[in-house]
């Protein structure tokens, strides 16, 4: 099962061109949603106000080279290794989700754009499954045990709030992708089509709900972390930690 491109079997009822157009539309949805969230939320005002305050209270000027070095170091420690999380469990969970999502996403794009019409190198579907399992392991661990409203507020593990929309739709999408792959081995076109409809439904929710979910936070958090480190270096920092605060989420 792990050696077969799961999207090749979908060509029985779905054109490869339609799959490719869908991916392009979802990329545009994320870009538009992020821009909308940035312009219509309070984030632009916050960053602008924070920059002005930082300049006003800075005790020393940070050169462009030093700022670039701080940014590079922050990307390694805060993003690549999730070093901003003080909780080891949350850090491991987020790393599994981060790298699992990256592997899963890149191999999905490769299988649809490069290999859906022909033979697929064995490593690609294997990595796709590995990325999906990493994501689900970290995601379900986070969803059922590490969410703030569950681990600290005592809410039910099955309770959902708007902040959970991103992780819930992500887990549902990838879960149905793996179930669909398993059902494809039975060569049942009807069953595959049904599971594909669930997969595409939750995938669409994941990518079009950017303005209302925490999807865009993966773009903002590195910026906030870099700004915080630069302000610490200049002596003007009063930003909270970008994670593990009183309302820290995914």
Image (cartoon, helix red, strand yellow):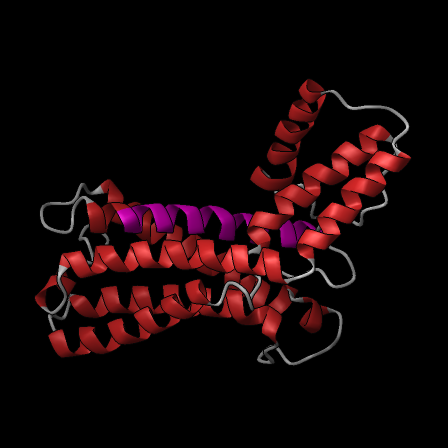
| Relative image position of residue 167 (x, y in whole percent) | 52, 65
Q: Nearer the viewer, residue 166 or 144?
A: 166
Quarter residue 233 falls in: top right
Looking at the image, is 141 positioned above or below residue 60? below
Confirm whether the magenta stretch covers residue 114.
Answer: no
Q: Residue at x 69, y 21 (%)?
A: 64
| Relative image position of residue 38 (x, y in whole percent) | 60, 56
Relative to residue 30, is residue 224 drawn left or right? Answer: right
For the question of whether residue 182 can be seen, the reply is yes
For the question of whether residue 144 can be seen, the reply is no
Q: Nearer the viewer, residue 235 or 198?
A: 235
Looking at the image, is 245 positioned above or below residue 77? below
| Relative image position of residue 93 (x, y in whole percent) | 57, 54
Relative to residue 66, is residue 176 drawn left or right? Answer: left
| Relative image position of residue 146 (x, y in whole percent) | 64, 64
Quarter residue 217 falls in: bottom right
Q: Nearer the viewer, residue 183 or 165?
A: 165
Relative to residue 5, is residue 227 drawn left or right? Answer: right
Confirm whether the magenta stretch covers residue 102.
Answer: yes
Looking at the image, is 240 positioned above or below residue 187? above
Task: Look at the image and give the residue range highlighted in magenta.
Answer: 87-109
Q: Residue at x 65, y 24 (%)?
A: 68
Q: Dividing the image into 4 quarters, which one contains the C terminus?
A: bottom right
Q: Residue at x 22, y 59 (%)?
A: 19
């Amino acid at each position: 099962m792990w050696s077969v491109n799961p999207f090749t079997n979908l060509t029985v009822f779905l054109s490869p061109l339609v799959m490719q157009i869908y991916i392009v539309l979802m990329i545009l949805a994320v870009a538009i949603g992020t821009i909308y969230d940035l312009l219509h939320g309070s984030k632009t005002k916050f960053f602008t106000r924070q920059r002005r305050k930082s300049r006003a209270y800075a005790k020393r000027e940070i050169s462009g080279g030093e700022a670039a070095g701080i940014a590079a170091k922050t990307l390694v420690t805060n993003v690549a290794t999730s070093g901003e999380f003080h909780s080891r469990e949350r850090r491991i969970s987020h790393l599994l989700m981060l790298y699992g999502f990256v592997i899963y996403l890149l191999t999905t794009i490769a299988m649809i754009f490069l290999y859906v019409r022909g033979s697929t190198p064995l490593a690609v579907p294997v990595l796709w499954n590995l990325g999906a399992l990493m994501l689900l392991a970290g995601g379900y661990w986070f969803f059922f045990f590490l969410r703030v409203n569950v681990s600290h507020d005592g809410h039910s593990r099955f309770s959902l709030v708007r902040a959970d929309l991103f992780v819930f739709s992500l887990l549902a999408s990838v879960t149905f992708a793996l179930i669909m792959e398993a059902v494809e081995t039975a060569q049942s076109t009807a069953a595959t089509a049904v599971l594909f409809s669930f997969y595409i439904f939750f995938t669409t929710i994941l990518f079009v709900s950017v303005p209302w979910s925490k999807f865009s936070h993966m773009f903002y958090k590195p910026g906030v972390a870099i700004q915080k480190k630069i302000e610490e270096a200049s002596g003007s920092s009063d930003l909270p930690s970008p994670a593990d605060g009183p309302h820290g989420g995914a």
